[in-house]
C-alpha cells in the first residue's frame, strides 16, 4: 500500500528505502538552496550550503509545509522531522543537486511527520551553487539563493503505520 496511489520510486540501490518501510507521504518542493561564499582553512574560497528554503506542496499544488535548515521539514499540522543524509547519487542532470537518502534523526509536534524514518530527495532540478570562480575575496561572506525543485518521499516503518 502506498500514499495516494503512488508507488515506491525507481531509484539506484543506495537510495532505496529500507525493507519494512512504507511510503506515507510525498511533497513537491519549490524554493532555494542558500549558499555562502567562504574562505576555507586552506585559503581557498568555496560556496558552502547554508540551508534550503522551500515550500512543500501536495499533488494539487496546495502549500502543505516548508523545508528549511536542519535539514528539516515542517507540515502545516505542526509536525516536524529533521534528517541526516546517509547516501547520495548525482542527479541525471548535472545542473541539479544530487538525489539523497536521508535518515530521520529527530521530531517535534504530532502529525504526519511523526514516525517518519526515511526520506528520499528525488527528481531535482537546479539548486547547484554558482561557479567556483564566482567565490573569491571580493564575494567573501556573500549569500546567494539558487532556485530548485525536488520531490520528497517520506517513509515510516510498516510496524508503526
Image (cartoon, grey):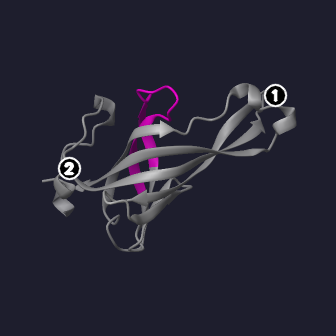
| SS assignment at label 1 | loop
Give the residues drawn in magenta, as a range.
84-105
- Residue 95 vs 65, above or below: the answer is above
Residue at x 60% of width, y 50% of height: 51
In the picture, the quarter occupied by the C terminus is bottom left
Residue at x 31% of width, y 57% of height: 59
The residue positioned farthest toward the left in the image shown: 1
Mark 1 or 2 closer to N-term? 2
Q: Which residue is mark 1?
A: 43
Q: Which residue is mark 2?
A: 6
Residue 93 belongs to magenta span: yes
- Residue 112 vs 130, above or below: the answer is below
- Residue 7 vs 87, above or below: the answer is below
Comparing marks 1 and 2, which lies closer to the viewer? 2
Residue 26 lies, in percent from the top left, at: 31, 54
Label 1 crowd bin: few (<14), some (14–19), many (20+), radius 10 Å: few
Residue 3 lies, in percent from the top left, at: 21, 56
Whether residue 74 is visible here, answered yes or no, is no
Q: Is residue 1 left or right of residue 128?
A: left
Residue 139 lies, in percent from the top left, at: 82, 38
Residue 11 belongs to magenta span: no
Amino acid at each position: 500500500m502506498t500514499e495516494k496511489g503512488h508507488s515506491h520510486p525507481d531509484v539506484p540501490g543506495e537510495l532505496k528505502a529500507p525493507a519494512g518501510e512504507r511510503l506515507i507521504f510525498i511533497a513537491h518542493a519549490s524554493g532555494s538552496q542558500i549558499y555562502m561564499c567562504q574562505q576555507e582553512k586552506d585559503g581557498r574560497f568555496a560556496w558552502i550550503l547554508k540551508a534550503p528554503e522551500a515550500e512543500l506542496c501536495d499533488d494539487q499544488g496546495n502549500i502543505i509545509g516548508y523545508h528549511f535548515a536542519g535539514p528539516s521539514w515542517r507540515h502545516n499540522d505542526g509536525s516536524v522531522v529533521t534528517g541526516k543524509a546517509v547516501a547520495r547519487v548525482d542527479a541525471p542532470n548535472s545542473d541539479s543537486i544530487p538525489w539523497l537518502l536521508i535518515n530521520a534523526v529527530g521530531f517535534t509536534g504530532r502529525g504526519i511527520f511523526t514516525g517518519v524514518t526515511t526520506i528520499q530527495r528525488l527528481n531535482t532540478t537546479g539548486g547547484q551553487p554558482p561557479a567556483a570562480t564566482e567565490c573569491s575575496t571580493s564575494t567573501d561572506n556573500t549569500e546567494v539563493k539558487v532556485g530548485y525543485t525536488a520531490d520528497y518521499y517520506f517513509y515510516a516503518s510498516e510496524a508503526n503505520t
